Image (tube, rainbow, N blue to C red):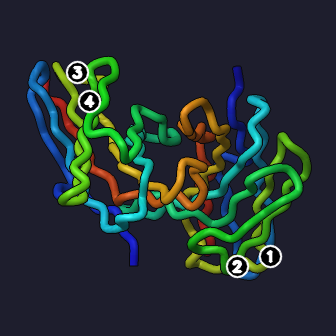
C-alpha cells in the first residue's frame, strides 16, 4: 500500500519563483493536511481540508494556497517563494475511527530550499 | 497561547532499559493526545493515543500516561531497542476530529547498544 505520496521529494527554488507540492492518498480518507517542519521544531499546520470541497487555514497559512482537487489529492502552492519558506513539508491524511481516534498518516516529506 | 512542549530535547538510554519521554501541554481544552515517532528522513508515524477521559493506555511495549491535573503526558517504552531511536512528538487536539493538532518540538531518543 502506498499510503500518502508526496512529490517532489527535493526542490530548490529561487526567491520569487512559484511551485506546487503534490500529495495523494489511497486510503479513502476524508481529511488531509499540510504541515511544515523546521529544525528543532515540531510540525506546524499550514492548511487542512476536513473533507472534499473544503479547506481551512492552520497556524501558518501566509504565503501558501491549497487545492483539494478530489478526495485523493491535496496540493500546496507557493506563489512567490521566500527564504523563510525553506523547510520540510509533510502531507498527511486521516479518518475518524471508532471512539474518536484520529490517526494521521504522513507522507515522506518534501525538502524545499529557497535561495 | 496554547503550546505543547517537552522537558528534554534529547534522551539517551541503554538498550534493554525502559525509556520515559515527557511532554507538557497548556491547553486545558485539549481532549485528545497522540504520540508520534519520526525516524530520520521519514514522516511521523502514529504510536499511541489517549483521550482526556483516560489516565493510562497501553500498547505493545508502549504506555501513555496522562495527568490532567498538571497537564502532563508521558510515553514509556519498555525494553528499549535500537530500532526505537528516533524523534518522538507529542501532539494535542482540542477535539477528536484531529483538526489543528498542535505538535511539540520533539525529543530525540538515542539507544546505546
What number is the disc on residue B63? 4
Label 4 marks a residue whose chain is B
Tag 4 and tag 1, C-beta contact below 8 Å: no
Q: Where is residue A15 in the image (x, y as percent from the top left)?
A: 69, 80
Judging from the image, mark 2 belongs to the subunit labelled A
Residue A45 x %, y %: 58, 63
Q: Distance between the residues labelled 1 and 2?
A: 7 Å
* Label 2 packing within 10 angstroms: few (<14), some (14-19), many (20+): some
**How far is the residue under mark 4 from the one under mark 1?**
44 Å
When the figure is inspected, residue B16 is found, relative to residue A20, above or below; the finding is above
Distance between the alpha carbons at the discs numbered 4 and 3: 15 Å
Where residue B81 is drawn, which disc sits there?
3
Task: Please tell me how crowded label 1 is: few (under 14), some (14-19), or many (20+) other residues with Cα within 10 Å.
Answer: some
- Whole-number angstrom distance, CA of label 3 to CA of label 1: 44 Å
Query: Mark 4 or 2, which is nearer the eye?
Result: 4
Pointers 2 and 3 in contact (CB under 8 A)? no
Whether the residues at callouts 1 and 2 have beta carbons within 8 Å, the answer is yes
**Viewer-side residue, A103 vs B10:** A103
Q: Is residue A52 left or right of residue B54?
A: right
- Residue for point 62% across, 71% down: A114
Residue corresponding to mark 1: A79
Q: Is B112 in front, or is A23?
A: A23
Report how far apart the C-alphas of labels 4 and 2 lie in the structure.
Answer: 39 Å
Q: How crowded is mark 3: few (under 14 residues within 10 Å), some or many (20 or more)?
A: some
Secondary structure under tag 3 reads loop
Q: Image quarter for residue A105?
A: top right
In the displayed structure, B80 sits above or below B48; it is above
Whether discs 2 and 3 lie on one chain: the answer is: no
Residue at x 60%, y 73% (from the top left corner): A85
* Callout in the foreground (3, 1): 3
Amino acid at each position: 500500500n502506498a499510503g500518502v505520496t508526496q512529490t517532489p521529494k527535493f526542490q530548490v527554488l529561487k526567491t520569487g519563483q512559484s511551485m506546487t507540492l503534490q500529495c495523494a492518498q489511497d486510503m479513502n480518507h476524508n481529511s488531509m493536511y499540510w504541515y511544515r517542519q523546521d529544525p528543532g521544531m515540531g510540525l506546524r499546520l499550514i492548511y487542512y481540508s476536513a473533507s472534499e470541497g473544503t479547506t481551512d487555514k492552520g497556524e501558518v497559512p501566509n504565503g501558501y494556497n491549497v487545492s483539494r482537487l478530489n478526495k485523493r489529492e491535496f496540493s500546496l502552492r507557493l506563489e512567490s517563494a521566500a527564504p523563510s519558506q525553506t523547510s520540510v513539508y509533510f502531507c498527511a491524511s486521516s479518518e475518524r475511527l471508532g471512539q474518536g481516534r484520529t490517526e494521521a498518516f504522513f507522507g515522506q516529506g518534501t525538502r524545499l530550499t529557497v535561495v | 497561547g496554547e503550546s505543547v512542549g517537552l522537558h528534554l530535547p534529547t534522551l539517551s538510554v541503554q538498550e534493554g532499559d525502559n525509556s520515559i519521554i515527557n511532554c507538557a501541554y497548556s491547553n486545558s481544552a485539549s481532549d485528545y493526545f497522540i504520540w508520534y515517532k519520526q525516524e530520520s528522513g521519514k514522516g511521523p508515524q502514529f504510536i499511541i493515543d489517549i483521550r482526556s477521559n483516560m489516565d493510562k493506555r497501553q500498547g505493545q511495549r508502549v504506555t501513555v500516561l496522562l495527568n490532567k491535573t498538571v497537564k502532563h503526558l508521558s510515553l514509556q517504552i519498555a525494553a528499549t531497542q535500537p530500532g526505537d531511536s528516533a524523534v518522538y512528538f507529542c501532539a494535542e487536539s482540542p477535539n477528536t476530529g484531529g483538526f489543528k493538532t498542535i505538535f511539540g518540538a520533539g525529543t530525540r531518543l538515542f539507544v546505546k547498544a
